[in-house]
Amino acid sequence: MPQKLSKLEEKAIALLLRHQDKGLLQSELWHKLGVTSREGSRIAIRLEKKGMVKRVKEFAKDRWTRRLVPLIRRVTIEPIRGAPCLACEQEHVCGEGGVISPKNCPRLEKWVLESHFTKKSEISQSTQT
Ligand code: SF4
């Protein structure tokens, strides 16, 4: 079930998702949100209770503080770009127990294999440079 967020919580999550790997120190987030540390702490605690961030203790700038690391990820369509299912004329008959399904679809299998080898080749080229 989707979590109901306040406007400030939404802004905080949007900022944290821009730093989704390392997160942000809470003071950096308060500054970017334009709120007091007290207000900011409340937002962080609420987001933690909702399971959307992890508050990690960290020594930074000569004091103990918390780093807010998002536990959610930005979703993009990039991984399924070009998938045959998106424009498939057999989609209405495709599924478990149907005439055709993702388990036995040659077009899907071909796309998965091509995507896999393309990605593998891109990774290999980027590690050689
Ligand atoms: S699995 Fe194959 S048949 Fe089913 S929707 Fe995707 S491309 Fe179409």
Image (cartoon, rainbow, N blue to C red):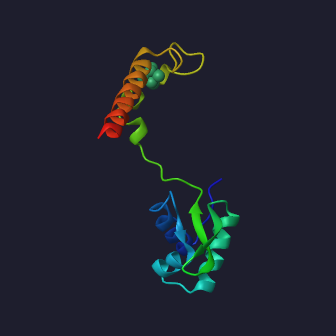
Counting from the top left corner in percent of width and height, residue 86 is at: 39, 32
Ligand 1 falls in quadrant: top left
Residue 98 in the image: above or below residue 14? above
Residue sticking out furthest to the left: 129
Front in this rendered view, residue 102 or 110: 110
Counting from the top left corner in percent of width and height, residue 4 is at: 62, 64
Residue 33 in the image: above or below residue 99? below
Residue 18 in the image: above or below residue 45? above
Counting from the top left corner in percent of width and height, residue 122 is at: 33, 34
User: Residue at left 67%, top 65%?
Assistant: 48
Front in this rendered view, residue 125 or 43: 125
Does residue 24 appear left or right of residue 64 in this picture? left
Q: Quadrant of residue 90?
A: top left
The number of numbered discs placed on residues in the rendered structure image is 0
User: Residue at left 48%, top 65%?
Assistant: 14
User: Residue at left 47%, top 67%?
Assistant: 15
Tell me the quarter of the image containing the C terminus: top left
**In this orientation, does residue 48 appear?**
yes
Q: Quadrant of residue 45?
A: bottom right
Does residue 117 appear left or right of residue 74 in this picture? left
Front in this rendered view, residue 52 or 118: 118
**In this orientation, does residue 88 appear?**
no
